[in-house]
Amino acid sequence: MDGGRPQQGVPNAKAFPSVPAVQALLIQAISFALVLVMAYVMTALTNNQLSIGAAAILQGVVAASITRWRDMAAWWAPIQLLFPMAAIIVHAMHLPAWIFLTAFILLLGLFWTTFRTQVPYYPSTPAIWEAVSALLPRDRSLRCIDIGSGFGGFVLHTSALRPESVFTGIEVAPLPWLVSALRAVTTRSNARFVRGDYERLDLADFDVVFAYLSPAAMPSLWRKANAEMRPGSLLLSCEFDIPGVEPHIVKHVTKDAAPLYGWRF
């Protein structure tokens, strides 16, 4: 879910807001102003006007270029590139207002604090679920937490395999949390789902912590895990490792699946 890595070698980095979404919006505003100036100069020099479509493409290119210069996460550049043209296309379709309201509510429920936490929605796959299950100790009951549990697939699957253990999912976005909680009720699962921020948890309460977050979130997760997790516990991360910390486990589940990393305490 790396909305903006530390700014290195970029002058006046503190002049920009720290929240990636606000940065992106500001960059679009700056790009719009630059394109207006370009269009004015072009008209004055050549007596030709820049079309709306060409202006949108130019604004997208300028915004994407500034985004890369700012060293924001890789996914922001294509978003910035396509946003102006997408806005024009949507406006031209004359869609009713309720469609935008519905889409906004659904996206808000799904992504919620993504722009603050820099953790987008990354669904794990059944192959990852099986790989994590194979790493769980078999000689005792466990207390396990899935950080950023999404729609609850991993927690529901693993709790069915290990009914003697307690599996909990924590999710900050309300829509995935609600869906996962309803799934647990309708399937009569003993899985638990909590809506909240994992930063408020005490990781000492768990034998296994599983996370599928983002590169931006891993240093903070490591600091918390290193301070709180008990000897004998296990931290697992799908796809993203911890910079500068050698994992004890590196498991390539399938050729196409993301690797699984693990650290023993």
Image (cartoon, rainbow, N blue to C red):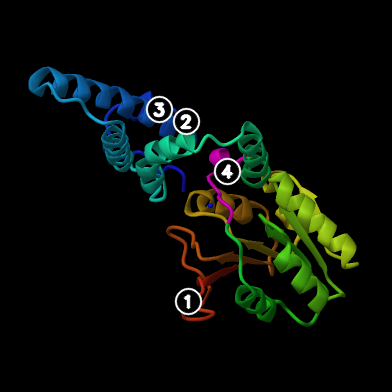
Crowdedness near tag 2: few (<14), some (14–19) or many (≥20) residues, C-alpha within 10 Å: some
Between the residue at mark 3 and the residue at mark 4, the CA separation in whole angstroms equals 18 Å
Q: Mark 4 points at which residue?
A: 114
Image quarter where the C terminus lies is bottom right
Q: Say what secondary structure mark 1 lies in.
A: loop
Name the kind of residue labelled 4 in the image: Thr
Residue 88 at x, y percent in the picture: 41, 35
Please state the extent of the stretch shown in magenta in the rendering: 113-121
- The residue labelled by disc 2 is 22
- Which disc, if any, is residue 256? 1
Asked whether the residues under the numbered discs 1 and 2 touch, taking CB atoms below 8 Å apart as contact, a structural biologist would say no
Q: Label 4 neighbourhood size at 10 Å, few (<14), some (14-19), many (20+)? A: some
The amino acid type, in three-letter code, at marker 3 is Leu
Horizontal arrangement in the rendering, residue 112 relative to residue 77 (left or right)? right
| Contact check, label 3 and label 2, Cβ < 8 Å | yes
Q: Earlier in the sequence, mark 1 or mark 4?
A: 4
Q: Report the residue at 57% width, 58% height from top.
A: 122
